[in-house]
Amino acid sequence: MSKRGTDADRALVVIVDDDERVRLAIQELVQSVGLDAACFASTQELLESEAYERPGCLVLDVRLPGLSGLDFQRQLNSSGKTKPIVFLTGYADVPMTVQAMKAGAVDFLTKPFRDQSLLDAIKDAIECDIARRAEETIVQQHLDRFDTLTARERQILREVANGRLNKQIAFDLGISDVTVKLHRSNVMRKMQVASVASLIRAWEMLPSGVREKDVH
């Protein structure tokens, strides 16, 4: 494999189909437009590789030996290791299509499909993954900054995010308005935001488990 293909930052199209001819044909198509591609005959083969960790998307046959495409999608969703999926099937099945799309599939193509239809779906899937990874990076930044706050500062942040005024927060916590303003200033500095609106957006991007946790 070329050095370019081993670059962990490049998008990788992962093709999982038990038909070798189909796998290789899709791989050749994907590589013809300058994208990296890796092939697997089953979801188990994929899980035993490092390919899943690369940014990109899955091109997944619905009917596979062992764990089926839809079962694999459910497993990924339940584990939180989601990745955009373009499903391929040799059988037009509306309920199956609806199920896959509701679970987050980018597209569901019936064989034989047009090359351009698959390439368009792959493009959309990669863009979804790039956006998802960018958001995850921002969320992690907010979490890291949130971890630097004291318990009192977290209380103030929660109250500000809930729309409470300084004097209301001061009354509820039994402290002065000046102290509330000082804490709020420290919170904004540590969270690296310049406005209350930005502070609230940062708060809302934190995982619900963090926002709902009691502060003592």
Image (cartoon, helix red, strand yellow):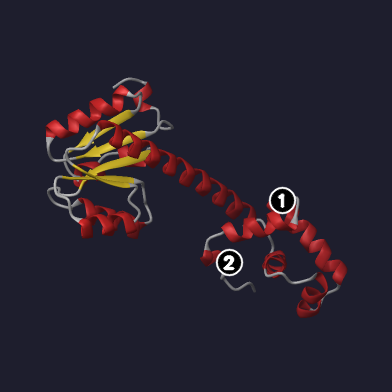
Using the image as rendered, state which of residue 51 and residue 36 is in the foreground.
36
Decide if residue 110 is in sight here. yes
Name the residue: 19% across, 49% down: 62
Q: Amino acid at mark 2?
A: Arg
Q: Amino acid at mark 1?
A: Val
Picture quadrant of residue 213: bottom right
Q: Earlier in the sequence, mark 1 or mark 2?
A: 1
How far across and how far down the image is residue 129, in percent?
Answer: 42, 43
* Vertical position of residue 44 compared to residue 118: above or below: below
Name the residue: 60% across, 60% down: 204
Name the residue: 20% across, 42% down: 45
Using the image as rendered, state which of residue 23 and residue 54 is in the foreground.
23
Local secondary structure at mark 2: helix
Give how far apart the Cα atoms at labels 1 and 2 are.
Answer: 18 Å
Which image quarter is the C terminus in? bottom right
Q: Quickly name the residue at label 1.
A: 193
How far across and how far down the image is residue 145, in percent?
Answer: 64, 53
Using the image as rendered, state which of residue 152 and residue 2 is in the foreground.
2
Q: Quickly name the residue at label 2.
A: 211
Q: Are marks 1 and 2 in contact (CB under 8 Å)?
A: no
* Mark 2 crowd level (few <14, some 14–19, many ≥20, 10 Å Cα): some
Local secondary structure at mark 1: loop
Which image quarter is the N terminus in? top left
The dot on residue 209 is none
